């Protein structure tokens, strides 16, 4: 199985899951998301089910304003593509109030004006490095103790992020439950800077 996660320009993320199983015949492709639909054939006993798994997956994705699509070659496997929310949308869905900034230089003043509880920074930010933004926050008296969670796909960057003043670090990709738990922990710690 292969899994690919792609960040799109329209504030969404695509997750592509490719398997190398028996595949799905063309005549079944437009029915597999129907409740209780089961593909019939000689392999049915091997891959028995109730016909609700893909139906439920589609229901959940639809309720979060996402979409799911499938392409398949019978005898070679299938590729499922999920188009869904970005981190901002997931956090809002979990009840967090989010302020998203396009200009990193606005971070310090926005944190002061909006009384931000936690700043989440990617190390790779357009126009600058997230560690530089982290240092700006730490060098301002009003934001010096504000919790900062940094993230990046560069796992080796953890040390640089923490040295710049990040309170916590999470490598990408990550499980959303772990991410939420880390956010809740840092917010609960308030203005106490504890290395995570």
Image (cartoon, rainbow, N blue to C red):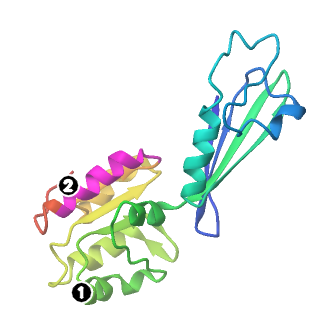
Front residue of this view, candidates 25 and 21: 25
Front residue of this view, candidates 103 and 162: 103
* Residue at 20% from the left image edge and 63% from the top image edge: 187
Number of on-image labels? 2
Residue 14 image offset from top left, x and y in percent = 63, 53
* Residue at 33% from the left image edge and 67% from the top image edge: 96
Residue range of the region highlighted in magenta in the rendering: 173-187
Q: Which residue is mark 1?
A: 112
Front residue of this view, candidates 6 and 60: 60
* Residue at 82% from the left image edge and 15% from the top image edge: 41
- The disc at residue 159 is none
Q: Is residue 33 magenta?
A: no
Mark 2 and mark 1 lie on one chain; the one further toward the N terminus is: 1
Q: Quadrant of residue 131?
A: bottom left
Residue 144 drawn above or below residue 58: below
Relative placement, left or right, of 101 versus 62 is: left
> How many residues crowd around disc 1 within 10 Å: few (fewer than 14), some, or many (20 or more)?
few
Q: Which residue is mark 2?
A: 185
SS class, disc 1: helix
Task: Spot the residue most to the right.
Answer: 27
């Amino acid at each position: 199985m292969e899994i690919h996660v792609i960040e799109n320009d329209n504030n969404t993320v695509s997750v592509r899951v490719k398997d190398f199983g028996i595949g799905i015949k063309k005549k079944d492709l437009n029915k597999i998301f129907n409740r209780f639909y089961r593909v019939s054939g000689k392999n049915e006993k091997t891959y028995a089910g109730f016909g609700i798994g893909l139906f439920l997956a589609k229901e959940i994705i639809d309720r979060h304003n996402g979409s799911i699509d499938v392409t398949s070659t019978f005898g070679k496997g299938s590729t499922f593509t999920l188009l869904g929310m970005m981190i901002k949308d997931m956090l809002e869905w979990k009840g967090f109030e989010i302020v998203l900034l396009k200009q990193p230089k606005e971070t310090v003043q926005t944190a002061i004006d909006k009384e931000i509880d936690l700043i989440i920074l990617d190390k790779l930010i357009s126009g600058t490095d997230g560690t530089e933004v982290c240092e700006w926050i730490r060098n301002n008296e009003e934001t010096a103790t504000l919790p900062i969670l940094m993230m990046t796909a560069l796992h080796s960057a953890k040390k640089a992020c923490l040295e710049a003043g990040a309170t916590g670090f999470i490598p990408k990709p990550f499980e959303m439950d772990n991410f939420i738990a880390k956010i809740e922990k840092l917010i609960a710690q308030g203005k106490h800077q504890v290395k995570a």
